[in-house]
Image (cartoon, rainbow, N blue to C red):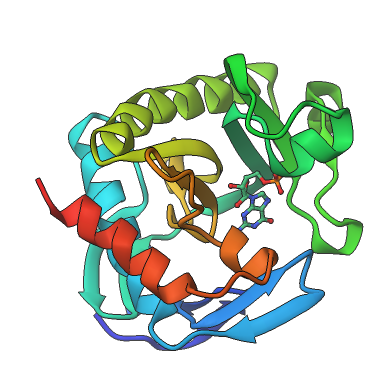
Amino acid sequence: MNKTELLYEGKAKKIWKTEDENLLISEFKDDLTAFNGQKKSSEAGKGALNNKISTELFKLLNSKGIPTHFVEMLDDNHMLHKACEVIKIEVIVRNIATGSLSKNLGIEDGKVLPFTLVEFDYKNDDLGDPKLNDQHALILGLVEFQDELDKLRRVARQINDILKPYFFEKGLKLVDFKLEFGKDKDGNIILIDEISPDNCRFWDVESGESLDKDRFRQGKGGLKVAYENVLERILKN
Ligand code: 5GP
């Protein structure tokens, strides 16, 4: 399958059309952005690491019955996937308080939450991805029906129930992560985008060290080594 026309360029990926209208190619870029694009950099090899990590995690989720857009990894920086209508909701799943949750609500950083929290953000860079409740999402027409929002929450929790113990066995706490969903040509809601240290927080169980994009957000350095470490743990059975 070949790239034909550039459909969209985002902060971390370019999305290409292919000869098949039902299939797209994501090209994972080395660019890094944070704080809604205000902080920018680039790290050679980051895109390939995210492509490989996402490939492994999509395969795992597919094997557990979670439908995703993933078809195959084509090469280091390219993934072939189904074409979907993107649902403009970022589904945020949190096991441990940190980041914007601690900042906005004053919950102690590092506090284990009494239950897994699922939140919705409006995927809209111009507005800075604001928080959404169900009524906002319906008024904005981001989905048609309440049961679609219920499904997003249900599937996000199922994904957490698979990934949290999977990473814990590999010595990583899955602190929080962001998921995106779309509708395929048959109208099914499926997982899209990527699952990588760009949109997940991983803390080493022993040291508490961050092995994710917080290294860049907080100016700590060592981002590539951290992403390689995550991939190595995933590949080790
Ligand atoms: P927070 O709301 O604390 O900034 O982020 C919560 C989790 O969702 C983190 O794992 C973060 O990486 C992910 N996340 C939230 N919003 C975005 C976003 O716009 N882009 C990316 N890549 N990840 C996000």
- Quarter of the figure with residue 42: bottom right
Q: Residue at x 43, y 45 (%)?
A: 207
**For the view shown, which residue lies furthest in the top direction?**
114
Quarter of the view holding residue 22:
bottom left
The x and y percentages for residue 25 are 38, 74
Q: Position of residue 230 (x, y in %)?
A: 32, 57
Closer to us: 116 or 5: 116
Q: Is residue 92 left or right of residue 50?
A: right
**What residue do we see at 22% from left, 30% from top?**
64
Q: Quadrant of residue 79?
A: bottom left
Q: Is residue 186 left or right of residue 131?
A: left
Which residue is at 23% across, 53% downward? Answer: 233
Image quadrant containing the C terminus? top left
- Judging depth in this view, the residue of 190 and 164 nearest the camera is 164
Depth order, front residue of 143/29: 29
x and y, in percent, of residue 95 in the image = 55, 26
- Relative to 203, say whether 73 is above or below: below
Q: Could you tell me residue 162's position as x and y percent? A: 32, 28
Task: Judge whether 106 appears above or below 114 on screen.
Answer: below
Most extreme residue toward the front, as rendered? 207
